[in-house]
Image (cartoon, rainbow, N blue to C red):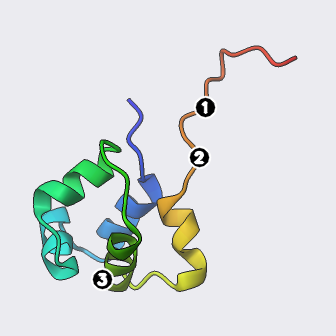
Amino acid sequence: MYRPFHKLRVRFAEMELKQNEIAKRAGMAPSTLTARMMGYQPWTSAEIIAVSKVLDIPTGEIGAFFFEDGPKDYGEKVG
């Protein structure tokens, strides 16, 4: 099953932080962060900045964490 924001989830583990702790430090409700991480609701720019600060993600790398490509359909024919 595809889970969005894989690189962001890896960063959580690297920082040894649970999702609820990240939400608290970023000033978000845990349920809001869960909705974003599941792809149910889009991120706001303020949330991206807040979570990036908590996770010490450099500004130039934000796109790699928050704007990844979706799952690939390798069964799809090209051309």
The residue located at (37%, 52%) in the rendering is: 42
Q: Is residue 6 placed above or below 48 in the rendered structure?
A: above
Query: Residue tagged by mark 1?
Result: 72
Quadrant, the N terminus: top left
Query: Residue tagged by mark 2?
Result: 69
Q: Is residue 74 left or right of residue 4?
A: right
Q: Is residue 21 left or right of residue 73?
A: left
Secondary structure type for disc 3? helix
Residues tagged 2 and 1 counted as in contact (Cβ below 8 A): yes
Residue 18 coordinates in the image, percent (x, y): 18, 66
The foreground one among 26 and 41 is 41
Q: Is residue 13 placed above or below 4 in the rendered structure?
A: below
Residue 9 coordinates in the image, percent (x, y): 35, 59
CA neighbours of label 2 inside 10 A, class few (<14), some (14 to 19), many (20+) = few
Quadrant, the C terminus: top right
Secondary structure type for disc 1? loop
